Image: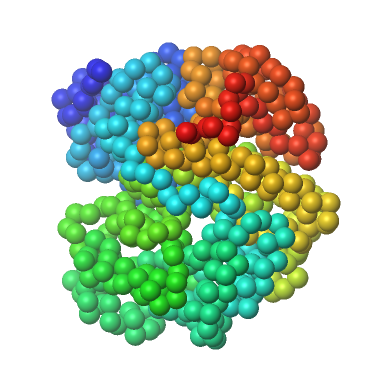
């Protein structure tokens, strides 16, 4: 392995404008035909990038579009970029990056070594080397995440969570899915910082959890590091040195998050981390809750000018400290992460808009997540996670977002058949990915689409043992469950193929992600592959397949006995 380490002297050699920067700038000339991925999961919708065009350029204010020093793009991030020519870039500190005029520029937040490593000749070579050194695999999340679909109450109940509607929702969903992991989303609690069930909404939460367990569900709750400024919890935590400090000596940092002004628990403080961990343990011990959806742990929620307990801790490191709580509970979901690759964490993409473009982008983002060390990834909720789109079909209170009227009109004009088609297509995109997560209930759709949902869930359950084996293998080797063609079959011109994927080595999946289309191109890799309709194809070749609404095109490598897979 040949390694080039970029320190200050090398920055000068590569033409970096060192004197003009507060920290060294690393400049890396791109190789001919070289493509790059990484940085942020969200960037997967635009990657890969190459020397063929500037990426991603500067914003109007002159700032970098991709800058992990100050933002995580609602998703998982890592100080890692990987190339199709076997190179990778790593830095222990968060950095911003851009590619202009064939040169990749890296700007770390602090003076830090930027490693530019040539590990081999392919994307897979680069990933394996980076993973082995910087984020080796540490196991697999609870296998129930992969065995059965996950339910989350957010879209269905949003601000009106309650004990009664939780139980009724769970019972009705048994018509469509086998019981598995069940998440109650925000507003189950009294307020931000008071992590107890609201007694008006949940008069007997222990009984509710037992009822859910008896149906076969395992219970999770949404939570965040926020604390409302208008309660006694805030006063107590302020006295404990558990909250993130502001600029002044006695100031407490405040952030505007969702439901208004809040403070933030500082998990770099033993008092803050210990208090929040105690809240989780109480919910598990008192009510039988098994895990939590760790939300809102975004870099922007830890202001750069704040003063954390751990002196010098970056916003990224504070976010990582909060999400480390997930490693202490049996079940967890993370929407944001920093430099946590290889950990046995279930992650999710951020809320999807209900559009075909978002559906297609989800594939690219999940593929990027795997390259960054977050392979146990879910593509949000079937149909998307923005409540306001679904308001016309929920038959209850309207959505609350300011832009909800626009979204409601968007769906209302489309009509129930458009929604049914979109919902089924979105489910197909998730069906053979690492995980499925439902929220908007399929019983709001016309009967024809309800039946298609049941058929897709049955297809998932057929493949669940294989997907579980992929998850186990990923936990041992670190290699992504969900892989691009470029990762598996390099050097064949597949760098920009981002609308199909491989699950493990033996299952090729090509969902229909283009609105109004009833056929699509599929790139068949080398080998013999049998399609879901029985057709046999010898790769490599590109084919066109029909995609009626009832079909999710998928292909199995010949000679594979799925019953013996993973043994």
Q: Is residue 432 left or right of residue 227?
A: right
Which of the pair 120/21 is nearer the observer?
Answer: 120
Q: Is residue 527 above or below residue 477?
A: above
x then y, percent, for residue 241: 21, 73
Which of the pair 311/438 is nearer the observer?
Answer: 438
Q: Is residue 111 above or below residue 194?
A: above
Asked if one can make out residue 44 in the rendered structure from this viewpoint, the answer is no
Name the residue rendered at 58%, 15% in the picture: 526
x then y, percent, for residue 499: 62, 32
Coloration of the structure image: rainbow
Q: Is residue 317 left or right of residue 103?
A: left
State the image quarter where residue 287 is shown.
bottom left
State the image quarter where residue 315 is shown.
bottom left
x then y, percent, for residue 212: 57, 70
Q: How many marks?
A: 0
Q: Is residue 525 left or right of residue 327?
A: right
Which of the pair 15/357 is nearer the observer?
Answer: 357
x then y, percent, for residue 10: 19, 23
Q: Is residue 403 above or below residue 427?
A: below
Asked if one can make out residue 214 in the rendered structure from this viewpoint, the answer is yes
Which of the pair 292/190 is nearer the observer?
Answer: 292
């Amino acid at each position: 392995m040949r390694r080039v380490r970029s320190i200050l002297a090398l920055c000068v050699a590569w033409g970096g404008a060192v004197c003009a920067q507060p920290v060294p700038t690393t400049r890396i000339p791109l190789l001919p035909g070289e493509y790059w991925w990484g940085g942020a999961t969200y960037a997967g919708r635009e990657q890969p990038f190459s020397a063929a065009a500037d990426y991603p350029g500067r914003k109007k204010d002159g700032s970098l579009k991709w800058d992990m020093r100050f933002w995580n793009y609602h998703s998982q991030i890592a100080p890692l970029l990987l190339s199709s020519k076997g190179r990778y870039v790593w830095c222990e500190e968060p950095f911003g990056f851009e590619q202009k005029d064939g040169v990749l520029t890296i700007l770390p937040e602090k003076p830090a070594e930027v490693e530019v490593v040539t590990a081999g000749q392919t994307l897979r070579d680069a990933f394996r080397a980076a993973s082995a050194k910087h984020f080796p695999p540490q196991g697999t999340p609870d296998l129930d995440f992969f065995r059965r679909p996950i339910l989350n109450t957010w879209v269905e109940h949003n601000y009106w969570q309650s004990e009664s509607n939780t139980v009724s929702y769970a019972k009705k969903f048994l018509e469509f899915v086998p019981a598995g992991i069940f998440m109650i989303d925000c507003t189950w609690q009294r307020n931000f910082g008071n992590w107890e069930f609201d007694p008006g909404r949940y008069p007997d939460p222990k009984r509710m959890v037992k009822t859910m367990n008896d149906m076969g569900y395992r219970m999770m709750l949404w939570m965040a590091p926020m604390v409302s400024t208008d309660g006694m919890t805030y006063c107590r935590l302020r006295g404990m040195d558990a909250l993130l400090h502001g600029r002044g000596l006695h100031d407490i940092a405040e952030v505007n998050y969702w439901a208004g002004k809040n403070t933030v628990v500082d998990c770099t403080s033993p008092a803050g981390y210990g208090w929040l961990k105690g809240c989780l343990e109480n919910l598990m011990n008192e009510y039988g809750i098994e895990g939590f959806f760790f939300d809102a742990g975004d870099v922007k929620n830890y202001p750069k000018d704040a003063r954390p307990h751990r002196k010098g801790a970056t916003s990224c490191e504070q976010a990582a400290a909060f999400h480390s709580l997930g490693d202490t509970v049996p079940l967890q979901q993370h929407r944001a992460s920093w430099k946590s690759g290889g950990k046995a964490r279930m992650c999710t993409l951020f809320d999807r808009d209900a559009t075909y473009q978002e559906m297609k982008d989800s594939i690219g983002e999940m593929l990027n997540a795997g390259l960054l060390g977050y392979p146990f990834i879910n593509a949000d909720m079937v149909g998307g996670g923005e409540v306001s789109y679904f308001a016309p079909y929920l038959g209850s209170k309207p959505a609350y977002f300011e832009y909800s009227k626009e979204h409601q009109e968007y769906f209302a004009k489309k009509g129930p058949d458009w929604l049914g088609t979109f919902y089924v297509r979105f489910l197909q995109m998730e069906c053979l990915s690492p995980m499925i997560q439902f929220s908007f209930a399929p019983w709001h759709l016309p009967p024809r689409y309800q039946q298609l949902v049941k058929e897709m869930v049955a297809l998932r359950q057929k493949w669940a043992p294989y997907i579980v084996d992929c998850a186990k293998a990923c936990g041992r080797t670190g290699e992504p469950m969900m892989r691009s063609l470029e990762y598996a079959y390099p050097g064949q011109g597949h760098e920009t193929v981002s609308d199909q994927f491989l699950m493990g080595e033996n299952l090729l999946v090509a969902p229909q992600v283009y609105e109004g289309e009833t056929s699509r191109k599929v790139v068949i890799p080398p080998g013999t592959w049998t399609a879901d309709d029985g057709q046999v194809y010898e790769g490599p070749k590109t084919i066109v397949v029909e995609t009626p609404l009832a079909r999710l095109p998928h292909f199995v490598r010949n000679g594979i006995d799925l019953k013996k897979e993973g043994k």
